[in-house]
Amino acid sequence: MVNPTPQPVQPLLVFANIAKNFGAVQALRGVDFELRPGEVHALLGENGAGKSTLIKVATGAHAPDSGHLVLGGRRLDALNPATARALGVACIYQQPALFPDLTVAENLALRLEPAGAWRRVDRRARRVRAAELLQRLGADLAPDAEIRDLSMPEQQLVEIAAAIGAGARIVIMDEPTASLTQREQERLFAIVRTLRAEGVGVIYISHRLEEIFALADRVTVLRDGASVGTHAVGDMDAAGLIRLMVGRELAGLPPPGGTVPGEIALELRGTGCAAAGVGSVTFAVRAGEILGLAGLVGAGRTELARVLFGLTPADEGEILREGRPVRLDSPQAAMAHGLAYVPEDRRRHGVVMELPVAQNITLAAHRRVFRHGWLSAPAENRVAAEFIARLGIKAAGPEAAVATLSGGNQQKVAVARWLATAPRVLILDEPTQGVDIAAKGELHRIIRELAQGGLAVILISSDLPEIIGLCDRIGVMRGGTLREILPGGTAAPVVMAAALGTNEKEGAA
Amino acid sequence: MRPPNQNHWKSHLFRYEVLLLLVLVVEWLVFWHFGTTVNRRGVTVGFGTVDRQFDILRHSCEIGLLALALTPVILTAGIDLAVGSLLGLCAVIFGQLWHDAGLPVWAAAAGALAAGGLGGALNAGLIARLQLPPLIVTLGTYSLFRGLAEALTRGAVTYTDFPAGFLFLGQERWLGLPVQAWVFAGVAAGIWILVHRTMTGRALRVIGFSPEGARYAGLPVTRQVALAYVLAGFIAGLAALIYTARLGQARADAGTGYELFAITAVVLGGTSIFGGRGSVTGTLLGVAVIAVLKNGLATLPAVIRLNAAEELSGLLTGGLLLGVLALGAAPKFLSAWRSRGQSRRQPALPPP
């Protein structure tokens, strides 16, 4: 599997068969990875393939359940953040965590100088050191500039300088170019190459294949929490990488189709919302149909769902419900028009953790349990019991706080809340994320049944097999708009290529 | 990590209210025992008399009303520091409408209630509509309302000579109980129904737990939060009328410091200052505990209360609040402390 380059160099970092579970969810199930000095090693995988978890193992935020690491020539079972830093691991996040009101030199000092309330502050030495570090990176930045006046890539630069100043030998960059312009990107690449020339090992995470081809020496692909191979970038092409990333199938579900979709339930004509960053979205979804929305993180899928549910109302185009134009400028309006939205962030938005299961289920369907605003306890118990039985929600009872439920059952409560409103269009945003395998299967069955019952379902998911196995048609979003609609059952590499946008550019650079 | 006790917060609240009831009973027995004496003419005086009990009831109605008004507000994780000042402003407006404008007393009373509602609406607009922090907004209106009351009276005028029909509200009995106690009971019942039996109450609770969650559940967050503040203002107006009727005078300094007693009562009653958790029953118990303490201390013999009923009352109220809060938090703290060893080994929650 591992690329057989003859190089007897001692690696900076080795992951050996790392596994990590969260409750019943297997986030990592056997990752092998090796970072050498002076290389840029790309980490590639679908959303949820385990990249973030792996990074957190490297920075000491998570301890692996099994497997070991080798760092600085030492074999370790786990790291904590302090040891990771001491052994030279630094992570540059998308959103730099700097103090906006302090200068570059002061921010660097905060990271690099020892603490101590009565320590003397040498401002001159501080500035000199900051200037040296920035110069080493070839960065054209004044040490006295305030962080708030810097652009995003300049702030990233300060983060990198802090990492280098602290003696980092391993620099992890998590989608560093996500919010950069082309020119800013070039500058960042130059700095990454400087790091490489200094013998630093860079773990580079990006969804953009062309960046990986332009910058990386080797690439490791993660799929479903396992590493499926490490290759020299020069040996690979875009199609090959995509094949490695996907290639998983959804077991236990009959293929889509079989039901005849009914009337058009919801139609979008050039719909968009400038503030939400989505625009010109056109599609229609019929009663009884599951329309999937595939795309990368940041493609605008959740933003579109928020527009449809009136959380960030549309300011462009038209929305039609059963052929009639409607204005969905508040969640209440969306609900009145038969829309329901099960949000992505279950814990913050999908359920109210502190509230009992029964109250969570009836929260949106208050008309069914409050007669003229007056609570009817029997009605509440009846509605709760109905959905607990129908969705198979496992809880100690209808009065149990939702916080005591497993992730899968919390998700079922979130779905039940919206089914109780008897919607005509149901938008599900990552309904199976962070849910164990059994609950996932049940949710798939429920979604399928809902569609067969005549509901129009819009399914947002980063889980490609789920989208492919469940949906009648697959809309692919990229850059805030719907790019194309593929038929259900389309091969995973084709969907992934559409989400990445590689098929339009004829492969990679 | 997931305990089998399903009914966690409800059973916790139940225990907490029982705890408060116990405190109240102990307070009562202590004052009854030490605060009741027989004077030279053989008449029982002090705490253990019906008159004294009615006195306590009478004196606690205004703060009790403000505490009831604050309960829905605090359930939304908000706060209203301005209710005491608004009480003063409404009292002055009532006095002026009756005395200076020559309106009939019922019209003046309606005017005072309307002023309370308007004052609440000002808070509501700033907090619910403009999303400004409740603490700062009501800190502002706290000064504003009191300042207005003082400006209207030039800090000097006191309105008196109200008709007997109005004073009836604050000084007489009806069906054996002080008249204002009936008003208080009515408002308490209304707030109890609002909080525990209506959609609005459920919405206020959810907003307190998670305003974003409430929005995603399609609840009209702005409207419900606004309602809580307008209602608080309206009840402050009602409290102003009762205050004026009890003392027979309307002054700009009416109700000074009442908001703090009211907040203390609500929090003592188990309503979380972070929103979501709490009950009207708890607030009523909280009001009772504070009122009995304040009034009971004055009936104790000088030796016991060290000649300092006022100071002692403040001291004990503060101590009680902190003590009961600590006791209420103890089970949670203990269980968290016990499970610390386990959770360090395996975090049970998936990453967000």
Image (cartoon, coloured by chain):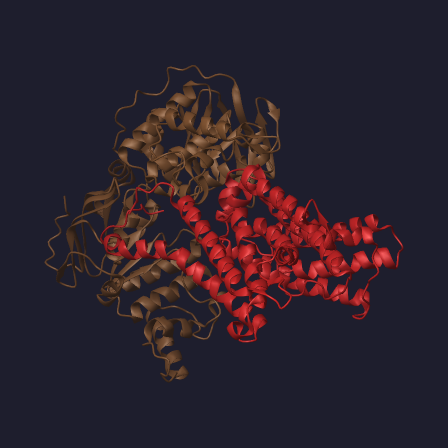
Chain colours: A brown, B red
Left or right of B61? Residue B77 is left
Q: Quadrant of the N terminus of chain A?
A: top left
* Residue nearest the observer in this picture, B62 or B257: B62
Count up the numbered dots: 0
Which quadrant is the C terminus of chain A positioned in? Answer: top left
* Horizontal and vertical percent position of residue B326: 41, 60
Looking at the image, residue B256 sits to the left or right of residue A295; the answer is right
The answer to whether A191 is drawn above or below residue B187 in the figure is below
Is residue A150 something one can see in this rendering? no
Pick whichever, A74 or B147, lies toward us.
B147
**Percent x, y for residue A467?**
36, 30
Q: Residue at x 31, y 46 (%)?
A: B349
Q: Residue furthest front?
A: B41
Q: Kindly identify the residue that appears in the image at 73 percent across and 54 percent down.
A: B170
Query: In the image, is B69 to the left or to the right of B254?
Result: left
Give the image location of residue B123, x and y in percent: 66, 54
The residue nearer to you, when weighing A216 against A42, is A42
Please, is residue A486 above or below residue A64 in the view? Answer: above
State which quadrant residue A131 falls in: bottom left
**Residue A457 percent location from the top left of the image:** 45, 26
Is A164 drawn above or below residue B117 in the view shown? below
Q: Is residue A405 visible?
A: yes
B107 relative position to A408: left or right: right
Q: Is residue A442 above or below residue A3?
A: above
Residue A273: name its quadrant: top right
